[in-house]
Amino acid sequence: MKLSEFTAVMERIAPQDLAMEFDNPGLLIEPDHDEIKRVLVALDCSKAVAEEAAELGVDLVLTHHPLFFHPVKRLWYSEPDTAAACMLLRHGIGLFSAHTNLDAALGGVNDTLCELMHITDTIPFDEGIGRVGLLKEPVTLSEFASRAEQLLQTSVRLCGSPEALIRRVAVMGGSGGSSIQPAAQERADVLLTGEIKHSDALDAQVFGLNLVIAGHYETERVVLAPLIRRLQNECFDVQYNLSRADVNPFVRL
């Protein structure tokens, strides 16, 4: 498959006009060849992921998080911000990212989270990025949190009364601090998200909004396997590998 054909498929899956203004999705590093046969899929293009890409001999790394958000002044192997890019450039490997456009897209991060958590009748909220929907039956905040732990295979933190009844759920994978007020305006009982700041939790208390904080990595990595399946349906002549080096930087004791 030609590079232009692959990028066209990604544009159909996650149109770049859905991305937020601060974002930097798309082809960030052009490979030194035009034929795409092997793609490594990851949440982040860390140095370890770039090394894995080189070892596997892939043509392209596809990530959720862009490697660059701001102009780069120098490319040094010794600097954390550019070490992965240096590795990819050395081996002629390209880098493509789909970030907030994949959060917002149909079948993207937040739709995948809703499906996993059995949240239905969803509508977009917060600039179309997040989703608000309903549980089949009301549950307590504690029960909803336990469900998130089981389905996302993580540990969660709560803000709110464990006995509060939850039916209407707002979902924002990754960072959800800016979604607290929009979720409250949508009359959600709880916001399921990956991470927030201390001050965000205090704001949620003012709005009377419960929170389930399930981890940035855990609430976004869920999209990678479904994304690979969609790509396999459209790009059947390309081999996809889910990165093994793309691990959560936080560990549980």
Image (cartoon, rainbow, N blue to C red):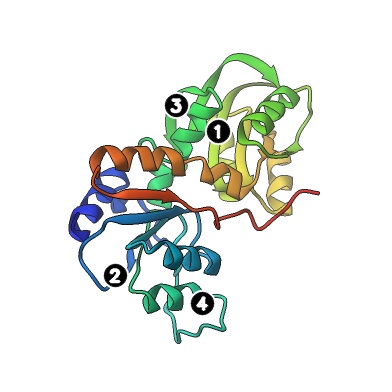
Distance between mark 1 and mark 2 Cα atoms: 39 Å
Q: Secondary structure at mark 1?
A: strand
Q: Secondary structure at mark 2?
A: loop
Q: Earlier in the sequence, mark 3 or mark 2?
A: 2
Q: Earlier in the sequence, mark 1 or mark 4?
A: 4
Distance between mark 1 and mark 3 Cα atoms: 9 Å
Residue position marked by numbered label 4 in the rendering: 83
- Residue positioned most to the right: 253
Q: Return the mark for residue 170.
A: 1
Q: Evaluate if marks 3 and 4 touch, with contact meaning CB atoms under 8 Å apart.
A: no
Distance between mark 3 and mark 4 Cα atoms: 40 Å
Residue position marked by numbered label 3 in the rendering: 122
Q: Secondary structure at mark 3?
A: strand
Q: Earlier in the sequence, mark 1 or mark 2?
A: 2
Q: Evaluate if marks 1 and 2 touch, with contact meaning CB atoms under 8 Å apart.
A: no
On screen, residue 90 above or below 150: below
Q: Evaluate if marks 3 and 2 touch, with contact meaning CB atoms under 8 Å apart.
A: no
The reply, left or right, for residue 197 in relation to residue 45 is right
- Which mark is in front, 3 or 2? 2
Q: Evaluate if marks 4 and 2 touch, with contact meaning CB atoms under 8 Å apart.
A: no
